[in-house]
Image (cartoon, rainbow, N blue to C red):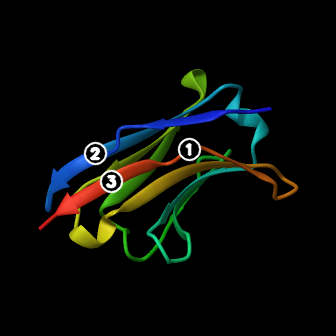
Amino acid sequence: QVQLMESGGGWVQAGGSLRLSCAASGSIFSFNRMVWYRQNPGKQRELVATILTSGSTNYADSVKGRFTISRDNAKNTVYLQMNSLKPEDTAVYYCGAQLQSGYTYWGQGSQVTVSS
């Protein structure tokens, strides 16, 4: 059983930056991809960024050019650097570790609040 622990969320003014971290209890090499999603109450969970074991990345159009996903395999940690934050980025951000089968382990979520 893998556990994911997110940290780094908080409150920031529009235009500011935050970095989210997702530390896994085991090796992240075993996962096909690591992902960051976000969700607001009453809305569907939105895929924000993906990073494969190869290091290839993909982003939602809404965050391209502002967010960067990265991984430190030695620390079994995935990061989401968020710059030029906007009020519409406010959400609970979830880290996910996805197996080849599609099964995904989830972290507990980290609140990000961006004020205008």
Residue denoted by label 3: 112
Secondary structure beneath dot 1 equals loop
- Please determine whether, in this image, residue 6 is positioned above or below residue 105: above
Identify residue type, mark 2.
Gly
Question: Mark 1 or 2 closer to N-term?
Answer: 2
Q: Which mark is residue 76?
A: none
The residue wearing badge 1 is 108
Q: Quick check: 70 above or below 86?
A: above
* Structural distance between the alpha carbons of marks 2 and 3: 5 Å
Q: Amino acid at mark 3?
A: Val
- Residue that protrudes farthest toward the right in the picture: 101
The amino acid beneath tag 1 is Gln
On screen, residue 52 versus residue 99, left or right, reads: left
Q: Residue at point 48% right, 43% down?
A: 70
Q: Confirm or deny contact between disc 2 and disc 3 (CB under 8 A).
A: yes
Instruction: Please tell me how many numbered marks the rendered image carries.
Output: 3
Query: Would residue 17 appear left or right of 78 to someone viewing this image?
Result: left
User: Between marks 1 and 2, how big is the CA–CA gap?
Assistant: 15 Å
